Image (spheres, grey):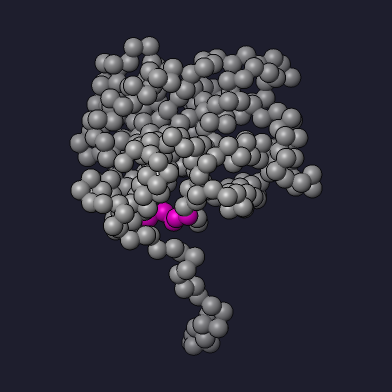
Amino acid sequence: MTEYTPTNAGTVTRYVVVESYNVTPADVAIRAYEIAKGVMIKENCFGLVVMGKEEDVDRVIAEVRKMDPAHIFVKDRGFPPGDARRCRATLGGARPGFHGIEFEMGILPYISHALEELDHRDAAAIAAPKSAQNAPRLDVYTLKKMIDTQEP
Amino acid sequence: MVKVFIYPATSLILSDMVTRFGHTPLGSAIAIRERVQTPGLESVPLQITPEEPKKGLRWAAVEVPSGVRGRMSLYGPMVEECDAAIIINNADLAFGCMGCARTNELLKFLLRQKDIPKLELEYPANEDEGVRFVAAIKKFLNDLGGKP
């Protein structure tokens, strides 16, 4: 095994995911570049990857979020942008972890709608979500009955 | 500001909600970043070394496969560190190999055993469920003392 010397130690990397009808990742990237001041910004198909000192990254993210607060989402990332261990340019195919974001991007419109709703509604007054654990499941007796009623 | 463990640990939605409502999310990226930024022996891609399954013995028995123990060395310290947890059940996103599946089961078991505020949910499938989902998270996080 060889010695490992980390690059970009002491920095944080965050994803900015844009799921908006009014703002594109390119718009967000331009705004982020305007206020970057030493923060590395990489634009991609769903938003940005922002890397730098934590306070600088938070400053840039707080500013770009203002463009469309209910439609811009942020999450942490372990690797720096373009890291050969994760970047699809070197690995080929989708980056590991993209499938998770892809799955949740299908749900983001509901979340954005809810965030806009909750701007003028009280969260405490809204009923709790239904739990799937309490939802009735298909029991074996019903299944047997269904099988028996099938025509041969 | 409270440290909230999120499950699935890679969830974009939970990570964003926790940050948005004034707390600190604890997820995979934090643990991976710690390893990626620590000097030592090179062990691509995640800098998981043979030491990690040994550290995982704190949360899983020696009979448990090393894959589970290795993963637990990432999540275990965060489970101990967290002050609250949000769990999304039946998440397709958390689907993975047997190592992931068993680690997820152990992770949820450890969180449920721990005496901390917990919120268990399902992913929303329409706008109405989305409103209930976000309202539940907002209420839970506000009750922990976050910004309104």
User: Dividing the picture into quarters, in which one does residue A59 lie?
Assistant: top left
Residue B15 in view: yes
Magenta residue span: B120-124
Q: Is residue B77 above or below residue A63?
A: below
Identity of the residue drawn at 49% across and 88% down: A149
Q: Left or right: A137 with respect to B129?
A: right
Front position in the image: B141 or B57: B141
Residue A124: x %, y % from top left: 31, 54
Quarter of the N terminus of chain B within the rendering: top left
Q: Left or right: B109 with respect to A91?
A: right
Residue B116: x %, y % from top left: 54, 48
Q: Left or right: B105 with respect to B19?
A: right
Identity of the residue drawn at 34% across and 12% down: A37
Q: Is residue B79 above or below residue A60?
A: below
Residue B45: x %, y % from top left: 61, 28
Q: Is residue A31 above or below residue A139?
A: above
